[in-house]
Amino acid sequence: MMFSSSVQSPFHNVDQYPSDLLQKLNGSVQVSVTYRKVWNDGFGARGWKVNATIGDPQIIASTRETGQKINTSVFIHDILDHFLSGFGISGHRSEAMALIQLSKRTGSSPEPDYEQLAREDILNGIVNGEKLRDFLPTNLISMIPDNSGMTDKEIIAYLKEKLGERRLVKYLVDHFFELGKSGESHAAESWKRLELDINKQSEIGHALQKLLEVIDQNVEKLGIEYLYGHIKINNNHVSFTINEPYIIDSIENYHVAVT
């Protein structure tokens, strides 16, 4: 069965990131980030974005807030597990791979997130970054009648009727795991190219969370409307610098040791 492919590769070469988004400086990487009190992106959320994500309609600004089971925020996930690991910022393939990296540095299982993605998105015929037919695993594609001309929602309805929802979700979760694990070597190579120790993922994540808690609390307290700066990361410490005509003493050049 042949279909035209819409797949956009989730693998990015970190050496080819534009210098205004990421720079390598004397053993450190510098990631450009932006804060807004209110983002005019359809969501209106307060918070931070990696500059590489600005303009992506799937990305919502995030703050220092963490989940109940994961002790780092979504913003840290975007930096470490997506951007520095060389994966796309959005797209279900990229998210599958980034969630494996999140799991490795936090000890959290990606399975609940995979199941949520399967139920909330895929079962509704929604796939970010590609067509449903290109995303589905071959064992599901082989069940679809040849030359069916079905829409994405019709394909999902057909598979759900054939397999039952519970079994279909299991197929999809297994597929997410397979996709996620396929990105492990690319993430390791990306961190190596950036001269970052991938064995310090957890420690770097914790340091970034501590950094974020300080700078986010301060910009919120001061009522700052807009801030553009850089998060600098190396194997020993992380820091924040501001590209603005004023200096906020409480966060300018603030750094946290990686321990």
Image: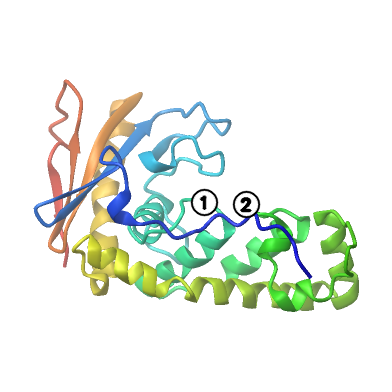
Q: Specify the farthest residue to the left.
A: 26
Residue 241 placed where, x, y %? 17, 38
Q: Is residue 49 visible?
A: no
Q: Secondary structure at mark 1?
A: loop
Instruction: Say which residue appears at 41% left-offset and 37% top-offset.
Output: 47
Instruction: Say which residue appears at 45% left-offset and 28% top-offset.
Output: 38
Instruction: Say which residue appears at 41% left-offset and 74% top-offset.
Output: 184
Name the side, left or right, on which 76 lies relative to 125.
left
Q: Is residue 196 above or below residue 166?
A: above
Residue 156 placed where, x, y %? 82, 63
Residue 114 placed where, x, y %? 60, 68
Mark 2: amino acid: Asn
In terms of sequence position, does the residue under pointer 1 or pointer 2 come before the other?
1
Give the quarter of the image for residue 229. top left
Position of the C terminus by quadrant: bottom left
Query: Crowdedness of circle 2 by 10 Å Cα count: few (<14), some, many (20+)?
Result: some
Name the side, left or right, on which 43 lies relative to 17.
right
Pointers 1 and 2 in contact (CB under 8 A)?
A: yes
Q: Is residue 115 visible?
A: yes
Q: Which residue is mark 1?
A: 90
Residue 253 placed where, x, y %? 12, 41
Q: How many marks?
A: 2
Q: Which mark is residue 128?
A: 2
Mark 1: amino acid: Ser
